[in-house]
Image: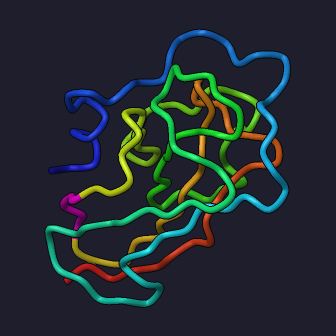
Amino acid sequence: MKPHALMLGAGLALASAAHASDHRTPAPEDARAYIISPSDGETVSNPVTIVFGLEGMGIAPAGTEAENTGHHHLLINTELDSVDLDANLPATDQIVHFGGGQTQVTTELPTGEHRLQLLLGDANHVPHDPPVTSDPVTITVE
C-alpha cells in the first residue's frame, strides 16, 4: 500500500477542516512514542512493516476525547520543526494519519533512504503539549 493510500483506507480518520482549539491537549511529561521496528540504520525491502510504540499514554481513535490518549501520525521524510504543532495535522503523503488507533502499518516506500518519526495527535489531530514524539529512525529501502 502506498503512503497516500493509507489516508483513504477504511476506518482511518482524516484531519477535519475544523480549526484547532485555543489550547493543546496536555500530555504527561514522561510520555513518549517510539518506533519498534524497523530499527535506525536498518536496510529493508518492500513491503515495509513499521511498528509503533507508546509509553505513558494510551491509544484511542480520532474523535475520542479521553485523558492521556491519542493516535499516531507517521512523519515520512518530514522534519518535526516543519510541522505546526498548534494546528490540526494535515493528511498528506508525508504526514500519514492512523486515526483508527492502529499501531503498525505495512506499506511500500520508494527505493532509497527515508526518515520516519511518530507524532501523537489528540482527538482532533492536534499534537499534545508537550508534543509526544519518537526519535527519528532512518532506514534504507532496497
Q: Position of residue 9 (x, y in %)?
A: 21, 32
Horizontal side, residue 71 vs residue 45: left or right: right
Residue 112 position (above or below residue 23): below
Q: Position of residue 57 (x, y in %)?
A: 65, 50
Q: Pick whichever, 100 or 93, lies toward us.
A: 100
Q: Could you say which quadrant of the image residue 29 lies in?
A: bottom right
Horizontal side, residue 40 vs residue 70: left or right: left
Q: Could you say which quadrant of the image residue 37 lies in?
A: bottom left
Residue 113 position (above or below residue 126): below
Q: Residue at x 47, y 61 (%)?
A: 77
Disc tally is 0
Magenta span dominant secondary structure: loop
Tell me if residue 107 is in the magenta stretch: yes
Magenta residues?
A: 106-110
Image quadrant holding the C terminus, namely bottom left
Residue 103 position (above or below residue 124): below
Q: Residue at x 47, y 79 (%)?
A: 138
Q: Position of residue 59 (x, y in %)?
A: 51, 43
Tell me if residue 80 is in the magenta stretch: no
Q: Position of residue 79 (x, y in %)?
A: 62, 59
Kindly give the residue lying farthest to the top in the view shown.
18
Q: Residue at x 37, y 34 (%)?
A: 100
Q: Residue at x 72, y 54 (%)?
A: 81
